[in-house]
Image: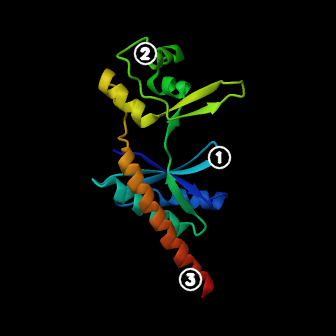
Amino acid sequence: MHKIALRILGVDDADDLAKLHHLGRRGQYSIAPQVIDGRMLAVVFPISEKPLDAAVDAARAILLALKSAIVDGVDPEIVGLTDVAHRVRMTREAVRLWIKGERGPGRFPPPVASIARGEQGSSTPLWSWPAVSAWLSEHYGMIDEYEHLTAVEVAELTIRLHHLNQEYAGSRAETAGS
């Protein structure tokens, strides 16, 4: 089963969150709202064989239920060393050794971003969880309970969500002008 986290903007009160919770389970998907580090996410669990279509249908339901919402895109699921260690139930040191290539098969996925720590030249690397999960599966047989979208699927879904937001922005403007 896929797990697709959609970023939602314009949702900022308890009523909106309650409406998202109310969307719950639908025909081809279920929605579980989450607030992580102040970001609103609608986590979509597609039941159908077409996860992108189910994610777009879920986004449409969100836009219909929450008139001020914008479905901003797919959350990239970026993780740090501690996050990886926690998810795989290993020590930070064991994961650090994988990253450095000092343990295991090597070729740990490269970081996709980093955060400056304020010290001159010092930064904290960040990884794509889907890439790390694929590496773990290939080399250690560790299977994530959820399937992840490929980069191409994320790009396609992002485009489809952009078009959907434009469609709803236009219909909202027409309704407001009436």
**66 over 173 or under it: above or below:** above
Kindly identify the residue that appears in the image at 39 percent across and 45 percent down: 151
Residue 78: image x %, image y %? 51, 37
**Whether residue 109 is situated above or below residue 75 in the rendered picture:** above
Q: Nearer the viewer, residue 49 or 77?
A: 77
Q: Disc 2 marks which residue? A: 101
Distance from disc 1 to disc 2, alpha carbons, whole Å, reads: 35 Å
Counting other residues with Cα less than 10 Å from the Cα at mark 2, is it few (<14), some (14-19), or many (20 or more)?
Answer: few
- Callout 2 amino acid: Gly
- Please identify, in this view, whether the residue under mark 2 or under mark 3 is nearer the observer: 2
Where is residue 54 shown, x and y percent of the image?
36, 58
Secondary structure beneath label 2: loop
Any part of residue 5 in sight: yes
Q: Residues within 10 Å of mark 1 (few under 14, many from 20)?
A: few
CB atoms of marks 1 and 2 within 8 Å: no
In the rendered image, residue 73, in percent from the top left (x then y), is placed at: 50, 54
**Residue 38 shows which numbered tag?**
1
Q: Give the residue type that dot 1 points to.
A: Gly
In this rendering, does residue 25 appear at all? no
Name the residue tied to disc 3.
Answer: 174
As measured in the structure, the alpha-carbon distance from the residue carrying label 3 to the one carrying label 1 is 31 Å
Tag 3, which secondary structure?
helix
Mark 1 vs 2, N-terminal side:
1
Q: Amino acid at mark 3?
A: Glu
- Is 76 positioned to the left or the right of 106 in the image? right
